[in-house]
Amino acid sequence: MPKQKTAMKFSDFKNNAELLTYFGLKVQKTDFIDLKAIVELPVPAHLQVDLDFALANRGDTDMEFYACEFFILPLLKEAWKRNPKAKLYSHPQIKYEDLILVPDYVVAPKNKTGEDVFGKPLLITVEAKHDDYDLGWKDAYKQLVVARFLNQNNEIPIYAIVSIGTGWQIGKLDGNIIYRHPTPLGLDNANKLFGLLDFIFADCVKTAEKFDMF
């Protein structure tokens, strides 16, 4: 991050616009991933049964934790199985100065020593409260900024996922741009969604290899 003449704490920012401006970041909605080129992957049969069961039994009062536990985590876990050089963390604390954030899920490379040490974040996943993508992205922007500080290298791209469980939006912090794909994918197109998650996990592994994180 570029040094600023006047240091500010995260608590000083009144909104995300101030945060992004201060750190020289811009949001751009664009097809930064060609979804047509993503190879569909059949969702494992056992997972499809679980997803169908969770959908059929979801009640009106089942909110955020239901989406995390029965939709988001199971799909992320299956993508992780296909890309085991990465590590999927559940609700880790990420800290910078006066700010402590808890992403729902983070993908980081496994530590070179073999010890279970939280590494450089390459993917953060946020469950959107009240099924509101915009609220989810407000959280994601902050988490991406903090993740970049933890990585200590502005050249390392970081993916972001904002999900309501049944629908998923994809983004990526690369350079000074936070790219947001305008087209969400949902459980009604589960094989394409699973293929996209596998692509993202594999790309995180490639990034870790490029920056000698393993």
Image (spheres, helix red, strand yellow):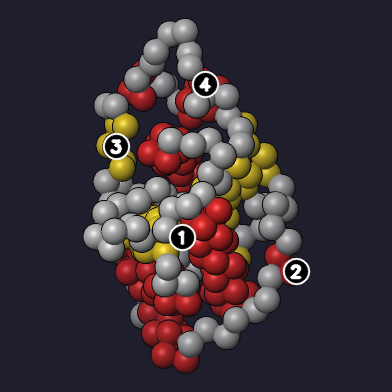
Q: Mark yes or no: residue 7 visible.
A: yes
Measure the alpha-carbon separation of dots 2 and 3.
37 Å
Q: Which mark is residue 2?
A: 4
Q: Nearer the viewer, mark 2 or mark 4?
A: 4
Q: Quadrant of residue 98?
A: top left
Task: Judge the density around disc 4: few (<14), some (14-19), many (≥20) Cα neighbours within 10 Å.
Answer: few
Residue 20 position in % (x across, y down) = 53, 27
Residue identifier under label 2: 36
**Are the two marked residues, 2 and 3, in contact with CB atoms closer than 8 angstroms?**
no
SS at badge 3: strand
Per the model, the C-alpha gap separating discs 4 and 1 is: 34 Å
Q: Identify the residue position indicated by label 3 in the image.
A: 95
Q: Secondary structure at mark 1?
A: loop
Gap in Å between the C-alphas at discs 3 and 1?
Answer: 25 Å
Residue 117 quadrant: bottom left
Q: Residues within 10 Å of mark 3 (few under 14, many from 20)?
A: some
